[in-house]
Image: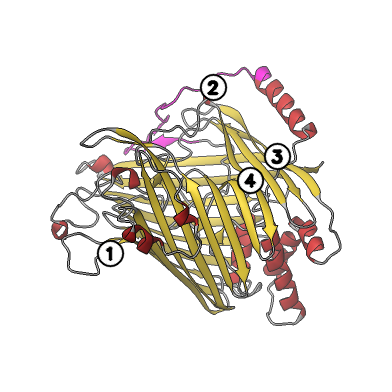
Amino acid sequence: MGLKLAGVQSLKRSVSSNSNGIFTASRCTARCPRFPPLFTVSAYLVFISFLIVSPVNAAPDAAFHFDAWVNFALERLETDGVTGGFHRHTRPRTRRQIAQVIRQAQRRIASEKSEQAPISIELLEKLQREFALELARLSGQNDEGSLRARGAIELRSSQTNSKLGPAFEGAFYYGSGGWLTLHQEFEVTNLPGKYPSLGSTASKRLKPWRGDFTADFKRVYLRVPISKLELLIGRDQLFWGTGFRGAVGISDNSPPFDLILLTGKFGRVRGTSFTAQLDHTWHDEDPRRYLASRYLAGHRLDYQINDRLEVGVSELILYGGETRGVEWQYFNPILPYYASQHNSDNDDNAMFLFEGAVRPVDGFRLYGELLIDDVQYVKSDDPNALAWLAGLEWNRALESRRLGVRAEYARVNRWAYTHLVQENQYTHFGSIIGHEIGTDADVSYIEGNYLINADTRMNLFFELERQGEAGVEDRFVGEDFRSISFPSGVVERRHGFGCRLVYEPIRAWQLDLSYQHDYIVNRGHLNGNSQNSNHLEFQFRYLWERGL
């Protein structure tokens, strides 16, 4: 596993070995593309030409980049005390928000409030180059609108063999001087399993084309400023939480949401509220079978107490049924969901999320999250359904501050993300909306990352993941939960360690090379079934941007 690139996986070579160390090809789980080389090259030349001359006025606002380096740089600088505090836990961030954080860091440096290491200056200068237009707008030097296109031409190998195949990710961005933005972002790939499915669904997220290629329109929206508020209408990804590898509330593990999102900042407080339509699922329990529509709503408050301490609280509710549509009571940003559904005598899936992060000294950060899916505050024969996450970051292992250590632990209890009503399980197109490990599982992770320069970093990592036998569709049906251990049943344990080299300049050629060894005990929840596997991934692409 290791860290994930935000957006795409590029050139990928994957090999595995059996328990005797003999390398074997991975088993084919999907039809493999058989495009002739001339056809492939010609098709992409036509496709790229269309992208460059297309007059579409659409684009991204939250993250007009396809790489992980922006969030990595921002969050490392915050931990080191360079930027000062900002609302870090509600993502994705808009380009304006990122520019405001950069300007805050510039002011702190000018006032000599923080001592800077050379690598911190390199990272900040790289951010300044990427967000030069937004910084100019903040300073009043440029109030004109701009239309830009960005694309990543990639080579990837199929997960089933070593042959290379093309892939493409593109985005259009229009931003006005008043910060109205249009955004369209899509990805064309033939790699299966992009959104891991642990639950059931009656809808299809991505339909394969010829050669198993899919076109995923990941983010398509209009963002409009309204006084101190911003309104987003369209499709976007949400990520609420303090961690860097996952979140127990809302993560990027499931497909993006089609939603209406309202955000606003009032002093040190930031508020967010949304309502989204989810996939359809079959309710196939007695007394009859029906197709259920499903919806998700949420609101949260982030409070930046000072530069070193931030806390947040969120409330989420997932509801659905055969005849239910969007219920506007749940779009009310200040209405308590739990009380509203209780008073209406509905059995909707209401959840609370509490989180906080503290930086006691520069270079060291502690954080945690707690999701309450269900808690018994009176005597009951029902179990608690909780998930939680905790972690730390330490960037002062060396005087140069180039070495960082990060550790994180996440646990999702047996009945978290489940619900007594079948269609109210916490999934979207079968993928868990919360942490990727799913229910009845936990994972421990530690890594050391060394910054060679602002464009290049190396990682060493280790993780231990435990999976119980229960899944998100295994709802509570009256079991003696006090006698069930965590994780439950025959526990599958995966020990993974590896290394990674990443080269990510702002533009042009990029490289991601990683190796991981996994040792799995009780694979498939079968006692004594152990397996060793080795995975080598090589990712390569060309990233470009053009003003239109």
State the residue position of label 2.
Answer: 211
Please tell me how crowded label 1 is: few (under 14), some (14-19), or many (20+) other residues with Cα within 10 Å: few
Which of the two discs, 4 and 2, sits closer to the camera?
A: 4
Three-letter amino acid code of the residue under disc 4: Tyr
The kind of secondary structure element at disc 3 is strand
Q: Earlier in the sequence, mark 2 or mark 1?
A: 2
Amino acid type at image mark 2: Gly
Query: Would you say 238 lies left or right of 530 here?
Result: right
Image quadrant where one finds the C terminus: top right
Label 4 SS? strand
Give the x, y percent position of residue 354: 42, 68
Q: Is residue 104 magenta?
A: no
Q: Which one is earlier in the sequence, the residue at label 3 or at label 1?
A: 3
Mark 4 vs 2, N-terminal side:
2
The answer to whether marks 4 and 2 mark residues whose Cβ atoms lie closer than 8 Å is no
| Residue designated by label 3 | 151
